[in-house]
């Protein structure tokens, strides 16, 4: 049996989309952006459900944010999570990774769990700190960039991804936080029918007061870092663009490669 | 005098590049802050490293302890929190690496010190430290400052964001050994072993020409298109990480921070957006050509030549044209 | 809306007792020759077994069906074999048995409103320089031009959207698009077996059409056309395929040709326009009206038109049967024998599969695949 809490975030997909900065330079325009569960979290929830399916136990998902977060929480429920909790309070707005970790820890500290899984980072602000900070606040160990989790009684044997194709094997006692790296499983599909089946399941909403955290510990005031402004990265020395139809461009490129002695 | 800490990162007997990149940048920041630059080194039997680092910093302090032989964030955290509490550096710089990210965020919380991760720029503005972070798939830079009441800061620095100086600036710092505060082994988190990702049939690091495909290749069925192109060029196929995640190509083909670092004569990036983890593994290539549907894909900022277009259309034609030109 | 599959409601849902196992469906099935899929047997199994048993081991096989509805057309008793295929795919989807490409297409349609994983805020990029009204942005127009995901994102299919825009403008039609707010019609999602996702997309689309007071829609793709016309519940708008509209424009002299296209042209009937909606004459009327075109028919035309295998979710599923040749290749070889210069198409899927086949058969020098709207444009 293993009880796992998974922290999930809803993020805009900006991999291909045009990203436009708002006039106040402190946010991006999200009108035409689409949102989804953070890619890393998607692997985290899958791993938790796989562990539950193998060992028994319970999976609880937690998300911070407004009602729109339900979308992501519902999908996690449909995938096989047992319960979802949404942490919502206007005071949470503007939280950095540290403030989010405080919010999560306030909600998690009273729950029953063996492990907490988070994504190794989020695709929007890329802080990559939430899980580690959460662990520190909860007073338990953690590991980041986790690419394999084997749970045996109270101990987990994990792999961490290092740079250059090297991995590290560690052993960690429960309770612990694992920040999950992509690629360690194959996240499942949930059909809309599956999501509809859980649409009636209630997702409790908790505000700052409900989890015993004061407004000055969260949001911008409770954060470590403050955003000054966004800008578009300087283009650097941009590539020379080869114009034309695919055929023409490929032809020109072939000529350039020949001239450069590539073949 | 005020002090800046740079935590030296080393693994399997090698000081990692990010250390020198941080020391290079740290020197500039130290000057702007009127502070000394101190390299901090933790490990077992690392005296030699300390000697090596002394020309890079005004001071090298090292903690030598068998319990620090392999990196363990828990042990490192204990040692560093004691060092930082005692010496109160204005700024502590740690690599934004697998090692640094396992360590720094929890350390910062313990010390109640504000931290900014994954920084690509560090500025000193009126005595205050500000950072630039690169977010939203590399499309936005965010300038961030720290909590107003902060007097000490921690940053993790993106690998390759700053160039390492060609040679040590010859600071000739004093080397100081500090006793380890660790009293016992950490028993709840243990390092077991390093494991190399399996070596595949091809060694992409040895190839002169790499035809590298990203998520834009769309499907495993399309990999042969890239293989054919590689064949006429006399190169081999490499890829970005999603391609490995999807099991379209084996792990040893992956270029980037969690894959291989390559430096071929020609790197053809097809349907790769150019996330920094990918760029880090290939930007030193002699000639980079990128083909991507998205004219704003960050890959174009490191490429020498670019084509905005569909790789599915470009790959076959390019293959034919090259075959033609080869005669 | 509950669409839960009960124990064995396949029989009722698809009226399977009507099946007399005559085998006419299999006899006409275009993929039965090259793939092990036997549609008669499949319907039989769906009658005798419960849905999950009927689906067992079918994951690959079922991928072969293009839902062209030849079987439906041929059935003497009104059974719809391709709906049974969709039902079984639905069971497989619920069990999570699907190729990764399908999973990604479904997820993308759900989160991004298109099955190609493309950014929503780039959907209308193709129209950036065209000065087209955007109804979703508040512009008023008599007619909505519903572009289709394929024509919005695929560079080749974008040419079709651009030529349709030009044709409509030339004829003085008052139309607009939805820009980045257009969302997938869900037709292909339904055929991949994701009925729930189809319903979700349909509901979102209906809500948007209603909000904007849209009464008249014209589509690029026969697939969108079919879905909007026959599968959207409570639709209170009129929908036309663009060939219907353009044929009218020609007949009412609103569109006049000034140039001649001196080519030998045949027409490939899209299943979703021809077989499934009996729109046979309008595309032909357009082609015959274009000065200079020498129009010839495929031997297999109208109801008997050979499916190109691009629809019914096949865009995301590779069929093992493709090793035995593709129908699109048969089609272009036939056309080559007929000595035509151009195969005219009226569907983005047909366009892409046939263009591929032209390359595979190395007929690029001989045969061109052009959308009817592109031919119209050439003659304006
Ligand atoms: C700790 C860590 C380590 C990592 N290590 C690595 C690593 O070693 N290597 C690595 O590569 N990544 C690594 N990543 C992942 C990295 O952040 C990116 O997610 C990844 O590099 C993106 O790969 P991509 O460019 O192939 O895909 P995407 O970012 O999805 O980009 C796909 C691109 O293809 C283009 N495209 C799509 N279709 C077509 C088409 N038909 N024709 C032309 N263009 C098309 C799109 O415009 C887009 O730009 C790591 C991440 C983390 C957190």
Image (tube, coloured by chain):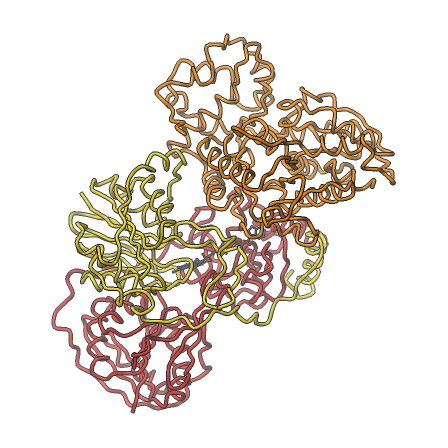
Q: Quadrant of residue C358?
A: top right
Q: Of all residues shown, which one is farthest toward the left?
A: B183
**Horizontal relation, residue B90 to residue A156: left or right:** right
Of C205 and A10, the residue lying toward us:
C205
Q: Quadrant of the C terminus of chain C?
A: top right
Q: Position of residue C316 (x, y in %)?
A: 53, 37
Q: Position of residue C301 (x, y in %)?
A: 71, 22
The number of discs equals 0
Q: Quadrant of residue A159?
A: bottom left
Q: Quadrant of the N terminus of chain C?
A: top left
Chain appearing in orange on the rendered image: C
**Horizontal relation, residue C326 to residue A14: left or right:** right
Look at the picture and state if C107 lies above or below C90. Answer: below
Check the rendered structure and report the hue given to chain B: red
Name which residue lies at 78% across and 31% down: C286
Q: Position of residue B229 (x, y in %)?
A: 61, 51
**Horizontal relation, residue C217 to residue C250: left or right:** left
Q: Position of residue B218 (x, y in %)?
A: 53, 46
Q: Quadrant of residue A51?
A: top left
Residue B261 can be seen, yes or no:
no
Of B39 and B110, the residue lying toward us:
B110
Of C124 and A54, the residue lying toward us:
C124
Look at the picture and state if C319 lies above or below B126. Answer: above
Look at the picture and state if B293 lies above or below C380. Answer: below
Residue B198 can be seen, yes or no:
yes
Check the rendered structure and report the hue given to chain A: yellow
């Amino acid at each position: 049996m293993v009880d796992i809490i998974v922290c999930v975030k809803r993020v805009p997909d900006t991999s291909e989309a045009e990203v436009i900065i708002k006039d106040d330079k402190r946010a991006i325009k999200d009108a035409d952006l689409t949102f989804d569960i953070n890619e890393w979290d998607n692997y985290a929830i899958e791993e938790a459900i796989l562990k539950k399916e193998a060992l028994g136990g319970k999976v609880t998902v937690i998300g911070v944010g407004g009602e729109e977060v339900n979308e992501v929480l519902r999908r996690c429920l449909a995938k096989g999570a047992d319960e979802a909790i949404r942490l919502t309070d206007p005071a949470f707005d503007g939280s950095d990774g540290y403030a989010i970790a405080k919010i999560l820890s306030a909600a998690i500290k009273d729950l029953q769990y063996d492990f907490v899984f988070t994504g190794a980072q989020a695709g929007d602000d890329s802080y990559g700190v939430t899980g580690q900070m959460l662990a520190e606040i909860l007073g338990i160990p953690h590991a980041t960039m986790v690419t394999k989790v084997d749970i045996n009684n109270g101990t987990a044997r994990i792999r961490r991804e290092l740079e250059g194709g090297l991995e590290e094997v560690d052993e960690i006692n429960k309770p612990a936080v694992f920040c999950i790296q992509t690629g360690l499983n194959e996240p499942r599909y949930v059909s809309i029918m599956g999501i509809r089946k859980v649409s009636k399941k209630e997702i409790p909403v908790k505000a700052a007061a409900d989890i015993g955290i004061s407004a000055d510990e969260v949001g911008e005031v409770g954060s470590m870092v403050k955003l000054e402004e966004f800008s578009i990265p300087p283009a650097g020395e941009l590539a020379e663009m080869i114009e034309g139809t695919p055929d023409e461009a490929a032809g020109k490129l072939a000529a350039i490669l020949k001239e450069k002695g590539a073949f | 005098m005020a002090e800046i800490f740079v935590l030296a990162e080393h693994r399997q007997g090698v000081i990692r590049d990010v250390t020198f990149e941080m020391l290079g940048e740290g020197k500039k920041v130290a000057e702007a802050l009127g502070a000394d630059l101190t390299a901090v080194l933790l490990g077992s039997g690392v005296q030699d490293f300390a000697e090596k680092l002394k020309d890079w910093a005004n001071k090298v302090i090292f903690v030598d302890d068998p319990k620090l032989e392999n990196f363990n964030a828990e042990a490192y955290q204990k040692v560093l929190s004691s060092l930082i509490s005692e010496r109160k550096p204005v700024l502590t710089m740690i690599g934004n690496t697998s090692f640094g990210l396992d360590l720094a965020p929890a350390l910062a919380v313990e010390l109640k010190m504000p931290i900014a991760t994954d920084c690509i720029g560090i500025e000193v503005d009126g005595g205050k430290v500000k950072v630039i972070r690169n977010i939203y798939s590399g499309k936005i830079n965010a300038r961030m400052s720290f909590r107003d009441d902060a007097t000490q800061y921690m940053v993790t620095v993106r690998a390759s964001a700053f160039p390492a100086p060609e040679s040590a600036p010859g600071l000739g710092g004093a080397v100081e050994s500090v006793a380890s505060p660790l009293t016992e082994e950490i028993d709840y988190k243990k390092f077991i072993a390093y494991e190399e990702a399996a070596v595949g049939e091809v060694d992409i690091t040895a190839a002169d020409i790499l035809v590298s495909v990203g998520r834009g290749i769309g499907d495993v069925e399309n990999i042969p298109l890239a293989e054919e192109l590689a064949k006429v060029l006399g190169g081999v196929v490499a890829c970005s990480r999603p391609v490995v995640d999807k099991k379209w190509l084996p792990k040893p083909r992956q270029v980037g921070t969690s894959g291989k670092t390559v430096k071929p004569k020609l790197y053809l990036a097809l349907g790769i957006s150019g996330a920094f983890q990918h760029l880090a593994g290939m930007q030193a290539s002699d000639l980079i050509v990128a083909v991507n549907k998205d004219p704003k894909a960050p890959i174009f900022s490191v490429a020498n030549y670019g084509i905005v277009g569909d790789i599915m259309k470009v790959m076959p034609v390019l293959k034919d044209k090259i075959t033609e030109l080869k005669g | 809306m509950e669409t839960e599959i009960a124990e064995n409601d396949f029989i009722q849902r698809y009226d399977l007792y009507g099946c007399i196992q005559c085998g006419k469906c299999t006899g006409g099935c275009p993929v039965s020759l090259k793939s092990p899929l036997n549609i008669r047997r499949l319907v039989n199994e769906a009658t005798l077994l419960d849905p999950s048993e009927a689906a067992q081991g079918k994951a690959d096989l079922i991928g072969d069906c293009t839902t062209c509805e030849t079987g439906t057309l041929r059935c003497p008793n009104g059974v719809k074999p391709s709906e049974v295929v969709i039902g079984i795919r639905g069971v497989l989807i619920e069990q999570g048995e699907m190729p990764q490409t399908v999973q990604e297409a479904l997820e993308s349609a759900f989160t991004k409103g298109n099955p190609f994983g493309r950014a929503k805020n780039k959907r209308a990029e193709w129209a950036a320089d065209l000065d087209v009204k955007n109804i979703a942005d508040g512009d008023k127009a008599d007619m909505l031009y519903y572009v289709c995901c394929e024509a919005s994102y695929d560079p080749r299919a974008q040419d079709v959207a651009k030529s349709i825009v030009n044709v409509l403008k030339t004829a003085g039609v008052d139309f607009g698009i939805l820009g980045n707010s257009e969302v997938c019609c869900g037709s292909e999602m339904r055929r991949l077996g994701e009925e729930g996702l189809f319903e979700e997309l349909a509901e979102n689309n209906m809500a948007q059409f209603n909000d904007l007071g849209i009464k008249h829609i014209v589509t690029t793709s026969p697939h969108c056309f079919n879905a909007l016309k026959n599968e959207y519940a409570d639709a209170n708008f009129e929908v036309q395929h663009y060939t219907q509209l353009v044929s009218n424009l020609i007949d009412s002299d609103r569109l006049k040709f000034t140039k001649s296209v001196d080519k030998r042209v045949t027409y490939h009937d899209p299943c979703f326009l021809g077989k499934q909606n009996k729109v046979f004459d309008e595309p032909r009327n357009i082609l015959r009206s274009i000065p200079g075109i020498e129009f010839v028919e495929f031997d297999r035309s109208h109801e008997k038109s050979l499916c190109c295998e691009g629809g019914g979710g096949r865009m995301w599923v590779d069929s093992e049967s493709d090793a035995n040749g593709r129908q699109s290749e048969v089609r272009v070889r036939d056309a080559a024998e007929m000595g035509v210069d151009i195969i005219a198409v009226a569907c983005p899927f047909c366009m892409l599969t046939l263009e591929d086949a032209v390359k595979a058969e190395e007929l690029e020098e001989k045969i061109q695949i052009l959308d009817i709207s592109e031919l119209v444009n050439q003659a304006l």
